[in-house]
Amino acid sequence: MHNIYPRCSLCRNTPLNGLYDGFRLAGKFICSACEEQIMTADVRTPKYQENLLLIRKVLYGQSADYICGQSNR
Ligand SMILES: [Zn+2]
């Protein structure tokens, strides 16, 4: 048993498989779901720009909360 369950810096969810279900970027964790979203987003769509912004926030260590307006409640 281990309790290494990181929280995704983008969606703030903890993936089921912990560290194995995503990757780390600049010391922050990004879950596989967000990774897939980032990888599959079309460059010409607003979603892609949104993802870029989110990643920049992660890299610069700022909160992305104001971009991710919708939280899962
Ligand atoms: Zn995520």
Image (spheres, helix red, strand yellow):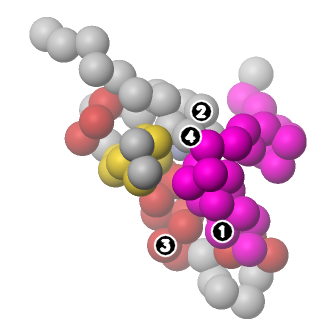
Disc 1 marks a residue whose amino acid type is Leu
Label 2 to label 1, Cα distance in Å? 17 Å
Which residue carries the number 1 mark?
52
Magenta span contains residue 62: yes
- Circle nearer the N terminus (1, 4): 4
- CA distance for labels 4 and 2: 6 Å
Q: Are marks 1 and 4 in contact (CB under 8 Å)?
A: no
x 41%, y 53%: residue: 25
Q: What is the quadrant of residue 62 in the picture?
A: top right
Q: Kindly tell me whether mark 4's CB lies below 8 Å from ligand 1.
A: yes
Distance from mark 2 CB to nearest ligand 1 atom below 8 Å: yes
Q: Residue at x 28, y 20 (%)?
A: 4
The CA span between labels 3 and 1 is 11 Å
Q: Which mark is residue 9?
A: 4
From the viewer's perspective, is residue 43 above or below residue 29?
below
Q: Which residue is mark 3?
A: 39
Q: Looking at this view, is 42 or 50 the one in front?
A: 50
Q: Is residue 3 visible?
A: yes
40 with respect to 43 (left or right) = left
Horizontal side, residue 64 vs residue 30: left or right: right
Span shown in magenta: 49-72
Front position in the image: 18 or 56: 56
> Mark 3 or mark 2, which has the lower sequence index?
2
